[in-house]
Amino acid sequence: QVQLVESGGGLVQPGGSLRLSCAASRSIFSIYAMGWYRQAPGKQRELVAVITSGSNSNYADSVKGRFTISSDNAKNTVYLQMNSLKPEDTAVYYCNVEVVTVSDGRGVYWGQGTQVTVSS
């Protein structure tokens, strides 16, 4: 079982920045992709950004140009730099990884979620 530890959420004013981090707590054999999803109250969970092992990244249209996803595979960590934050970015942000471990093979894992609130 891979455990994901997220950090970096909080309260920020519109136009501000936050950086989310997600670290996998267990040795991983290989990484297929790491990404971030978010879920606002009353809405479905949606993809924010994803980065593959080949460093290809994709973003939701709503965050393009404002958010940047990056990863440090040596540390099994994925980051989400969020700039020019808007109130509509308010949500619980979840880390998601698709990896291979020696003991469990290929699997998809979720973090516990971290709250991001954008408000003045």
Image (cartoon, grey):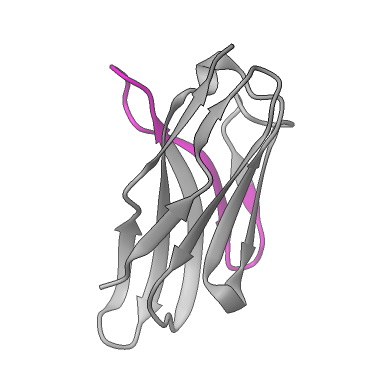
Residue at point 62%, 29% (across, down) = 63
Q: Is 52 drawn above or below residue 75 in the view shown? A: above
**Which quadrant holds the N terminus?**
bottom left
Q: Position of residue 5 (x, y in %)?
A: 40, 59
Say if the magenta span includes residue 45: yes
Quarter of image, res 103: bottom left
Q: Is 50 drawn above or below residue 55 in the view shown? A: above
Say if the magenta span includes residue 61: no
Magenta stretch: give its range.
38-57
Q: Position of residue 21 (x, y in %)?
A: 54, 54
Residue extending furthest toward the bottom: 102
Residue extending furthest toward the right: 65
Residue extending furthest toward the top: 120
**Which quadrant holds the C terminus?**
top right
Q: Position of residue 62 (x, y in %)?
A: 60, 24
Residue at point 71%, 20% (across, down) = 15
Quarter of image, res 37: top left
Q: Position of residue 65 (x, y in %)?
A: 74, 31
